[in-house]
Amino acid sequence: MSQAIHFQFKVVRKEFSLNASATIPGQGVTALFGRSGSGKTTLLRALAGLEPEVEGELVVGEQQWLHSAQGINLPIHQRAIGYVFQETALFPHLRTEQNLLFGWQRTAEKDRRHNPPQVIESLGLAPLLKRYPHQLSGGEKQRVAIGRALLNSPQLLLMDEPMAALDRQRKREIMPYLERLHAEAKIPILYVTHDLEELVQIADHLLLMDQGEIIKSGPIEILLADSSLPIAQDEDAGALIKTTLTAQDEHYLLSELSFSGGTITVGQVNQPIGSEIRIRIHAKDVSLALQPPLESSVLNVVKCRITGITPQGQSRVIVSMDAAGSPLLSRITQKSADRLALREGCEIYAQIKSVALHS
Amino acid sequence: MSEADIGALWVTLRLALTTTVILLLLGTPLAWWLSRTQCKTKVLIEALVAIPLVLPPTVLGFYLLIMLAPDGPIGALWQSVGGETLAFSFSGLVIGSVLYSLPFVVQPLQIAFTNIGNHYLEAASTLRASPLNCFFTLVVPLAKPGFITAATLGFAHTIGEFGVVLMIGGNIPGETQVLSIAIYDHVESLEYANAHILSGGLLVFSLVVLILVYGLNRQSPLNGRYR
């Protein structure tokens, strides 16, 4: 069953307007990324049916949830969604257990897709069942909220910056659960964030928003490595590459990862040969050379072709490159770019000083 | 206590209870509407609800007397559908009390409903709860302190009512004579002992009720001390 989602929304208010349309793949995590005030939350709320003045269309799988011209507007409580709010919105007068089962109890038996013991197990909620929300930590609350949304048997899971209110420690605590959710959920997940690190860890697809419009959408690897997009201007900008673990070097304790553009050697990864590993290469960790460096401490050199150069401020440029199908980004000084006479189409050697791993 | 005093006590309790039940039934939807509407007439309705707080009860009683009289608009309508005479009857008293105690029920409810905010209701609606279901599973338990306050204030305020009753109820023992009027009668006839019993009783009653309300409301689901 295809669960792809297509929407076309228009919301006009005095101080803000949303004018967005896109198709979201039926599986995986689609991140809504953009500055605050760009309309991410409004879009999410429109999908849920929480924005009364929205006009347009919304098709989820085979079902028409909204079609203003035909007067169709499915009430919120009849939409099979899971909504994880930033401030969790756990019901304060109900224990964790009753919060979790709130939607489940209101779902017809034939539509139920998850069973409570399984969700409680996978989110580690068993010790929290008898507690009230005010007796939970921020991270625990968020896990309960995710469980509650899942037990509502959604066809579409909407998550509005679920980690924004958490400190670094709590974020690290909850990330494994999100990654597991990502791997196991068979429904589309729409995830709002303005944190690039979060985005890279969890998203497959990206909708970039600005001033109430979707300015670009596509697979995350491609969008992250597009020097012309605003995310490339971020201090932590960088490319995301899918690799396969192909060899282990027991002597130097290194692992070899292969991708379309060649191989990359990293500190030993304790996973079986053949594992798929996502790596992140920050633009600031990539330097460029016209010739393959013969004697250098940098192990990883990849031959690329330049696909775009975008200035960043006065002194730096972002260079996007293609390594036989895999994108790469580099941030260098304008001076270096001029000295090497870089331009689109140039062949170049990217020296990668550091690699971050994501499973 | 004399038989007449006991009669007055019963009339008073019956009146307060009937008024409170009616006020909760009418006041809840009204307070809900006031807490959620963006409509411009809201201010007008709020002012009308609050009028008994500032108006001398005799003024309210005077207009009610005119309206409820057999040839008044409400009295005539009531009698045309087969009702008894409203002025100087228990039913008339109930109508007067409902109007007189309206703000004491509507205002605490409106504040309680406003304090719930929208995010719990939105969350519940994304979890397949219909608006009516949201109201009973979320609003009622979360606004419990508001309901307790509203019911108690409505009840207690009706018990203490004097001016309106005097104007539209008269002083018919067993029918419209309430405690406050009975006290007035005792004082008029210099029966201070009887007046003491009733007044002291009312004083203690009011104090106990208020202590109970404040005690119960210390534990609110919204302030995180719920257990």
Image: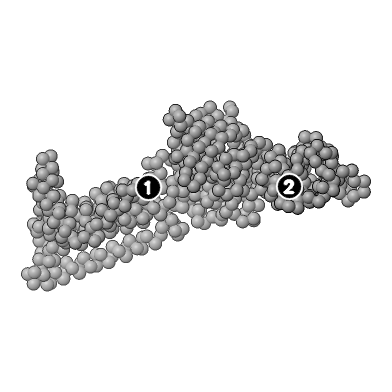
Q: Residue B193 location in percent, x, y?
A: 12, 72
User: Residue B212 occupies which quadrant of the picture?
Assistant: bottom left
Q: Chain of mark 1?
A: B
In x, y percent, where is residue A208? 62, 41
Q: Can marks 2 and 1 be said to lie on one chain? A: no
Nearer-the-camera pick, B64 or A168 = B64
Quadrant housing residue B111: bottom left
How far apart marks 2 and 1 lie (CA) works out to 49 Å
Numbered circle sitting on residue A311: 2
Q: Is A140 left or right of B184, judged from the image as shown?
A: right
Residue type indicated by callout 1: Gln
At x 72% / y 49%, what residue is drawn?
A312
Left/right of residue B83 with respect to residue A185 in the rendered view: left
Number of the front mark, 2 or 1: 2
In this picture, is B104 found above or below A188? Answer: below
On what subunit does the disc labeled 2 rest?
A
Q: Residue at x 43, y 56 (%)?
A: B222
Q: Secondary structure at mark 2?
A: strand
- Near-viewer residue (B14 or A73): A73
Q: Nearer the viewer, residue B121 or A10?
A: A10
Q: Which mark is residue B38?
A: 1
Residue B113 picture location, percent across and down: 37, 52
